Image (cartoon, rainbow, N blue to C red):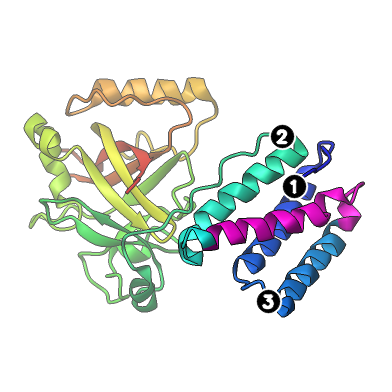
Amino acid sequence: MNIKPAPKKSKTAILLLFIGIMGVVFFAASAAATPAEVELTEKIRELAMDFAEPFLEEWYLFNDSLREYALTFVETTKKAGTSLVDSVISIRKAVELLIASLLEVDLPPAKRIRTSTLNFDPIQNELADARAWIRMDGTVLNYPVMYGADNEFYLNHLPNGKKSKTGSIFIDYRNTPDFSDPNTLIHGHRMKSGAMFGTLRNYSSQSYYNKHPSVVIFTPEGDYEVVFFAGYTFDQNAEGLPIKFKDAEGFDRYIQNIRKRSIFKSDVEVSYGDRLVTLSTCEYSFKDGRLVLVGKLLEKDY
């Protein structure tokens, strides 16, 4: 099969080519090589050519050799006895290689589609403000994470909106609730029963930290592990919690400061660009005290 080399095109043209070629190959892959289905494949090819024409200087990327490639690939798949479903990944790889050879460029790897192991549909149908779920194995920490218009409502309301002194676990309203900020703050009461963020007080024990060095956060877009590297207390009237950092120097200064003050020791490495999550609750050993755990956010790769 002779295909003339093509000059490098813009990213827009590459995207359009990929869509067009995938259409040709996928429809050809479902064909039984009957005249009617071959005609359908030809029409798909023509539509792809019309779609891409305004973005291309040449037509030969969608010439007859492309159709020949698609049909040949299908025939090879049929002879091997491979089903269409089993061939989808192979088809995609073959098309990507074809595009790369035609355009003489290195294509970036396909973006991994992330999803949660937790079904959020029933959760969000019942709890409209739920943005995540936080869970720590071996503890009572297992709650929906809410997001409101301020930091007041969920201090004394349950996730279902019912008023209660227990409140809810919730993301700071100043944050973007998708954990994309440099530091996402999550608040919760420190109940004497150990409920909500009541177990955070146990991190003053190194052995407890060693047993529970992280927490899992589930979101509709994908799941995360928050690996703790520092825990400390502070007077909320004297200092606050950062959500963003001016620069790398400011980030490093903050990390060094809280490591020195940490109630446990950790060898977790943290560097500028890492996203942080801070769990914040009350500290009763002094007036207006806060106890926080700070961790590095890592995508869960199941």
Labels 2 & 1 near each other (Cβ < 8 A): yes
Residue 119 in the figure: left or right of residue 56: left
Q: Main secondary structure of the magenta part?
A: helix
Q: Closer to the camera: disc 1 or disc 3? A: 3
Residue 302: percent from left, percent from top: 32, 49
- Tell me: residue 95, above or below residue 261: below
* Observer able to see residue 234: no
Mark 2 lies on residue? 105
* Observer able to see residue 185: yes
Classed neighbour count for the residue bearing mark 1: other residues with Cα under 10 Å, few (<14), some (14–19), many (≥20): many
Q: SS at mark 2?
A: loop
Residue 13: percent from left, percent from top: 79, 49
Question: Disc 2 or 1, which lies upstream in sequence?
Answer: 1
Q: SS at mark 1?
A: helix
- Tell me: residue 75, above or below residue 250: below
The kind of residue on which mark 3 rests is Thr
Q: Which mark is residue 34?
A: 3
In magenta stretch: residue 261 = no
Residue 54: percent from left, percent from top: 90, 56
In magenta stretch: residue 75 = yes
Mark 1 lies on residue? 14
Question: Disc 1 or 3, which lies upstream in sequence?
Answer: 1
The kind of residue on which mark 2 rests is Val
The kind of residue on which mark 1 rests is Ile
Report the span colored magenta. Answer: 53-78
Separation of residues labelled 2 and 1 (CA atoms): 10 Å
